[in-house]
Image: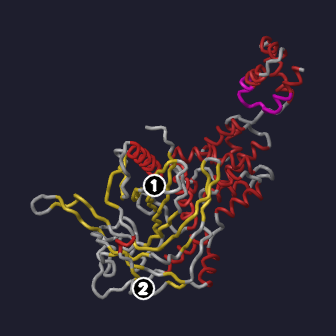
Amino acid sequence: MSGQSWEVVIGLETHVQLSTSSKIFSGSSTRFGAAPNTQANAVDLALPGTLPVMNRGAVDRAIALGLALGSTIPTRSIFARKNYFYPDLPKNYQITQFEIPVVQGGQLSFFVGETEKTINLTRAHLEEDAGKSLHDDFAGPHGEKSTGIDLNRAGTPLLEVVTEPEMRSADEAVAYAKALHGLVVWLGICDGNMQEGSFRIDANVSVRPVGQKEFGTRTEVKNVNSFRFLERAIQYEIRRQIELIEDGGTVVQETRLYDPDRDETRSMRSKEDAHDYRYFPDPDLPPLVIGQDWIDRVRAEMPELPAAKRARFEADYGLTPYDAAQLTVSRATATYFESVAQALPAGQAKLAANWVMGELAAALNRDERDVADSPVTPAQLAKLITRIADGTISNKIAREVFGAIWAGENGGDADAIIDARGLRQISDTGAIGKMIDDVLAANPAIVAEYRAGKEKAFNSLVGQIMKAAKGKANPTQVNELLKQKLA
């Protein structure tokens, strides 16, 4: 590669499958996993004389996301027909929104590491999903391969959320996608199941020389269904475009697919412009009129939003913005933390946050569990943390007790486990003093090093004392008494 410095420009379009029980313009079920073509009625099949009818629940969910993002909800929006050949959408057009979408503008804030970022949104519009082509699953009369069409997904309600091209790295794009995913699940408007296609991401990627104002030619990587694949697809596309330009080539505007097996993107089709779709207002659907009373009803039914909960966690529990953001990544995690914090003595919320983000999160990740299915309840964790706070056990011993609670030992009761295993912390100054005297007597060389000014020698002595106490001596008392005796 040359010495040219490049800037990456990324915008994301996310298809959020809405959690309605029926489709956006028909009464067919949206349940996942049914046998092919068992959830497609006359409207989905586009039989002559059938007409679409708007699903109010889909609009409710769009309004909720708009309110959560601080977007504008216009009083009037319209549906359009987007025309091109869909083998898996019998009408040969998709009903979507074009000129006046239901959600306009808005912002989403999130953390990339410990740095907070805010991305502006262009729009979010309602539309119907297409069906699914099943390739090579069927044999013709002479054994030849053929393609089948499953229309169960045709007409499933989608909310397409489009960002401004403001992201500058794959890490930023993944952090944004995770934040949006967390928000739609938090609101209950989408189940977030990426394996089932409930949350699919299209990444628009381009590069330009640092300092250049004009955007480079972008490519769209279509239908990425995992955060890891999103990161790798963007990274591959960045490398591909830079190498192509530096070798004298030109980036072509096109739609590409990411192949996770080969860790590369490949061309799918040339990218169409809006005029190729021949948008025009759908004559079968009247304008969507949303009054203030509708917006107020949806707002009243919404849960406390992540941003509000973050601010409250900082104010009520003294958490840092980063800790508050981590604890509000999901509604279940936020609820779990607050249940623990409310059961603790005042001033222990930071300790609760550390345990929820640390030991609990690690155990959930290891066993591939959700926090809602944690074997350790908030009440059990609160009792364990209380025993750290009151000096019954050390933080190190508490990790052993946590493992026993997780395994269901002694009914998951921290006190019973501590007593059964003999883990209560030694806080008797006489007993600790005797251990210190024994260690000092056995290690005159280390004592001499400390008195000669070597501070590390002190830590070595503490380690010897804790070893003699089998980790059960109160660390604060050990430090204080040792300093007194060495003085």
Q: Nearer the viewer, residue 394 or 252?
A: 252
Q: Position of residue 367 (x, y in %)?
A: 51, 46
Which quadrant is the C terminus positioned in? top right
Q: Nearer the viewer, residue 106 or 372?
A: 106
Q: What's the amino acid at mark 1?
A: Gly
Q: Residue at x 44, y 47 (%)?
A: 238
- Check disc 2 and report the residue beneath it: 285
- Check disc 1 and report the residue beneath it: 216
Q: Main secondary structure of the magenta part?
A: helix
Q: Position of residue 396 (x, y in %)?
A: 69, 35
Q: Residue at x 41, y 61 (%)?
A: 197
Q: Residues within 10 Å of mark 2 (few under 14, many from 20)?
A: some
Say which element carries label 2.
loop
Q: Residues within 10 Å of mark 1 (few under 14, many from 20)?
A: some
Q: Is residue 469 magenta?
A: yes
Rounded to the nearest whole Å, what is the CA distance between mark 1 and mark 2?
A: 38 Å
Q: Is residue 131 left or right of residue 473?
A: left
Q: What's the amino acid at mark 2?
A: Leu
Q: Nearer the viewer, residue 319 or 32?
A: 319
Q: Quadrant of residue 311?
A: bottom right
Q: Residue at x 37, y 51 (%)?
A: 250
Q: Position of residue 102 (x, y in %)?
A: 52, 76
Q: Is residue 451 magenta?
A: no
Q: Specify the segment rendered in magenta.
A: 466-480
Q: Is 401 located above or below residue 457 in the figure? A: below
Q: Quadrant of residue 68?
A: bottom right
- The first of marks 1 and 2 along the sequence is 1
Q: Is 143 located above or below residue 171 in the figure? A: below
